[in-house]
């Protein structure tokens, strides 16, 4: 299935890439009432980024005024370098730090795709808390809701259209990934989103949700957060490793969600928090990915 750019509300466009699995993410485009535009995230491979930019040109003749990064992950930032040099790239201050710290590592861990040319280019306009962009009379609010999926999670909220670009706070159809964020912080981020009462939610991966689908997605994600928390508490108390816990656990309704190996990484994060480590402590990436690969039976491949 090919990616498509869908107008989900006046001026609010979602670029949806099926099937939403590893490195195949969604992005957004907001066109204000004055015709100026802001892009929300880029994507992973050079070919996918060039296809995204071609789709954007089909909607607006004017090049976007700015790019917003919802977080630092490569599937959302590897296209940053394709933006004109004078275009501001906006992100949370920790998104900049983590883009620089991560480099192109994800392209070596998640094997399979021909990434083409990719370069590291971090946000150069950073903020904490919230920031509002004004495209004419069209209001675009950026809110930091992390740590949850990462330390730097920002959601993009259009209050007039009631559209939320949730970044990777929301996976629709896949398991959330909290190894670089926080198991304790995730339910709070979901609550922040819920309080906005979006009519349309564009997840970082997977299909767009509308109306009741938004509520049921948020309910499902909250239930997953509780599931991870209780699995971690039991396993931690019993002295079992995250990998042992996931291998030995009973069947659950989340088993059919894509990328089940993420549960291993999520338990590593939960264990770190139960050990009393700082909520933003970095995990041993080699250990976490090693266990995720052990669970999935080999390298974790992306078909981006
Ligand atoms: Zn991500």
Image (spheres, helix red, strand yellow):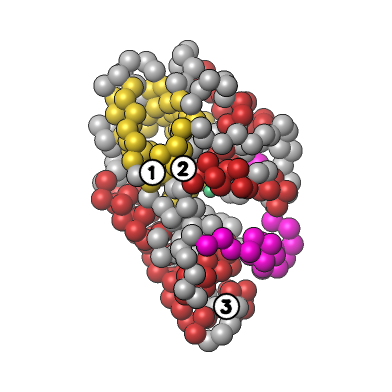
Return the residue found at the far top: 61
CB at disc 3 and ligand 1 closer than 8 Å: no
Question: Which is more toward the observer, 141 or 197?
Answer: 141
Point 46% across, 48% down: residue? 152
Residue under numbered circle 3: 245
Distance Cα–Cα, label 3 vs label 1? 36 Å
Q: Nearer the viewer, mark 3 or mark 1?
A: 1
Question: Which x, y percent locates residue 63?
Answer: 49, 17
Q: Nearer the viewer, mark 3 or mark 2?
A: 2
Tell me, yes or no, whether the highlighted magenta stretch contains residue 295: yes
For marks 1 and 2 on the same chain, the one whose residue lies earlier in the sequence: 2
Asked if labels 2 and 3 touch by Cβ distance under 8 angstroms, the answer is: no
Question: Which x, y percent locates residue 23?
Answer: 61, 45
- Dot 3 falls on a residue whose secondary structure is helix
Question: Which x, y percent locates residue 88?
Answer: 48, 26
Point 33% across, 22% down: residue? 135
Distance Cα–Cα, label 3 vs label 2? 35 Å
Residue under numbered circle 1: 128
Question: Which is more toward the observer, 116 or 96?
Answer: 96
Q: Assign the N terminus to one quadrant of the image.
A: top right
Q: Is residue 198 left or right of residue 295?
A: left
Q: Is residue 232 visible?
A: no
Please provide the residue range marked out in magenta: 281-304
Residue under numbered circle 2: 93
Distance Cα–Cα, label 1 vs label 2? 6 Å
- Dot 1 falls on a residue whose secondary structure is loop
């Amino acid at each position: 299935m090919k990616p498509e750019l869908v107008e989900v509300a006046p001026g609010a466009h979602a670029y949806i890439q099926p099937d939403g699995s590893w490195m195949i993410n969604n992005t957004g485009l907001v066109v204000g009432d004055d015709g100026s535009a802001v892009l929300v995230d880029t994507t992973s491979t050079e070919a996918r980024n060039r296809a995204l930019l071609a789709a954007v040109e089909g909607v607006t003749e004017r090049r976007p005024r700015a790019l917003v990064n919802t977080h630092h992950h490569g599937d959302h930032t590897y296209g940053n370098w394709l933006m004109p040099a004078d275009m501001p790239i906006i992100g949370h201050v920790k998104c900049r730090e983590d883009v620089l710290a991560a480099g192109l590592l994800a392209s070596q861990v998640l094997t399979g795709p021909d990434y083409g040319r990719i370069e590291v280019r971090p946000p150069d306009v950073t903020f904490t808390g919230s920031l509002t962009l004004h495209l004419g009379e069209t209001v675009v609010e950026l809110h930091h809701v992390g740590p949850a999926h990462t330390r730097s999670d920002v959601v993009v909220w259009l209050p007039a259209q009631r559209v939320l670009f949730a970044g990777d706070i929301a996976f629709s159809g896949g398991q959330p990934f909290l190894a670089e964020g926080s198991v304790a912080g995730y339910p709070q981020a979901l609550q922040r989103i819920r309080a906005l009462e979006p009519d349309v939610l564009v997840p970082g991966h997977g299909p767009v949700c509308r109306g009741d689908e938004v509520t049921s997605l948020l309910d499902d994600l909250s239930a997953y957060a509780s599931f991870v928390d209780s699995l971690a508490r039991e396993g931690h108390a019993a002295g079992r490793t995250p990998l042992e816990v996931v291998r030995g656990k009973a069947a659950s309704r989340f088993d059919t969600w894509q990328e089940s190996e993420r549960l291993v990484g999520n338990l590593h994060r939960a264990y770190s928090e139960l050990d009393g480590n700082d909520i933003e402590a970095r995990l041993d990436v080699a250990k976490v990915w090693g266990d995720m690969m052990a669970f999935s039976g080999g390298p974790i491949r992306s078909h981006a």
